[in-house]
Image (cartoon, helix red, strand yellow):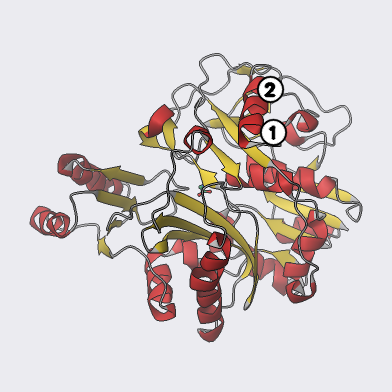
Amino acid sequence: MRILVIGNGAREHALAYSLSRDPQVTEVHVSPGNAGMSAIATLHPQADAVALAREIAADLVVVGPEIPLVDGVADQLREAGFAVFGPSAKAAQIEGSKKFAKDTMARAGVKTARAEQVAVGTSEEEIDATLDRFGPHYVVKDDGLAGGKGVVVTDDVVEAREHIRAVHAGGNPVLLESFLDGPEVSLFCLVDGETVVPLLPAQDHKRVGDNDSGPNTGGMGAYTPLPWLPEDGVQRIVDEVVVPVAAQMVEDGVPFNGLLYAGLAWGQDGPSVVEFNCRFGDPETQAVLELLETPLGGVLNAVATGTLDQLPELEWKDGYALTVVLAAEGYPEAPVAGVPLTGADPGSEARGVRAAGVRAAEDGVSEGAGAASGTGEGAAAGLVSAGGRVVNVVATGKTLEDARAAAYAELKNITLPGGHFRTDIALPAVKGEIRIDA
Ligand code: GLY
């Protein structure tokens, strides 16, 4: 199988690496990719996806990020005759339009936060009246695609109002939501119409600093599985959340095909949906794929070809996996680019390195633009930062504590002047501080 992965982050690096280890996969191509993954995949600069899929005669195209999905790249590829892992633009609205997601959940009878949209141009009086209907905890979301970074959760009404103004200034509406209490769970499910196959549950750490301090980010680390989740936790999420939503989307004529990511809070009554995403999460994917024994190419191909119901049960390694993100100085507000990164050169995958915001030192490409084209052999080492989340380290262990120790030990071999990372990924779970009341 020749596989094309679209995207350029650590999630795509993890997908490409797992695919490269599947005996059925003969070639892995990534567009645009990043210089850190050049040893395991052929990289292509930003290109028309259909033209590239034709050029390499792709047997399967895997779309990583939400923006091309919402923009319809999966539809274009399917119309051109390619097998695609990723939903249609209409189905991707489950992430792209919070109104679509809320309406779908309401019809499916799925528990989620109460929400009201605050449109651009809403008067100060109306904004204050809407804030009065929420609180004392304010959840203020950018109602556009913000990659997890557009959310402010605060008890301070002034901060809530300021975030509304900032999002409006950027041209997007705001969604005010009721606060959902309880630890968060990310459950990724392979979905092919009404067929739902869950992966292992994970937890992301979204705030930039230890003890959940500072602003939200795209995610600073994650671990899987969740030792504190009730034994029937995954089954409850599948039965109470994902199956009803998948069935509703089929009934509504917008069947989902790809990875449906349920972001949930586990409260006193069990799971409630915080949000849905239409793609693999980042950084949770880096940890989840580390424990998947079943070769990934066949799994994604089964979804893409509508045969998920025939896929044998997934096999998982015992133990835990954990990933830590090393971010650039200034992330998330103003990440510093062009800083030398050592210890994470291409070919470091077996040490757990998954590269994100990097470029080859000698490339003149602009920040976040990914890598120049090239193949693994002879690809230049010497990386510099080119984005906020620069590199991930993922490690496994028999216990969560072992996985934590292994990931942080490996991180010591990587240097990024001014870079920062959280030191407490999975620590509350290791200490037994996460409790479920249900
Ligand atoms: N882990 C958060 C996200 O992928 O949106």
Q: Earlier in the sequence, mark 2 or mark 1?
A: 1
| Marks 2 and 1 in Cβ contact (< 8 Å) | yes
Instruction: Give the residue at the far left of this rendering.
Output: 125
Q: Residue 57 has which mark?
A: none
Q: Is residue 352 visible?
A: yes
The secondary structure type at the circle numbered 1 is strand
Percent x, y of residue 331: 45, 28
Q: Which amino acid lies under the numbered mark 1 shown in the image of this protein?
A: Ala
Q: Is residue 132 left or right of residue 363?
A: left
Q: Is residue 364 visible?
A: no
Mark 1 C-beta closer than 8 Å to ligand 1:
no
**In the depicted view, which residue is nearer to us: 188 or 341?**
188
Quadrant holding the C terminus: bottom left
Disc 1 residue crowd, few under 14, some 14–19, many 20+, Cα 10 Å: many
Q: Which residue is mark 1?
A: 395
The secondary structure type at the circle numbered 2 is helix
Residue 120 in the image: above or below residue 358: below
Quadrant holding the N terminus: bottom right
Q: Which residue is mark 2?
A: 410
Percent x, y of residue 277: 51, 59
Q: Is residue 104 left or right of residue 124?
A: right
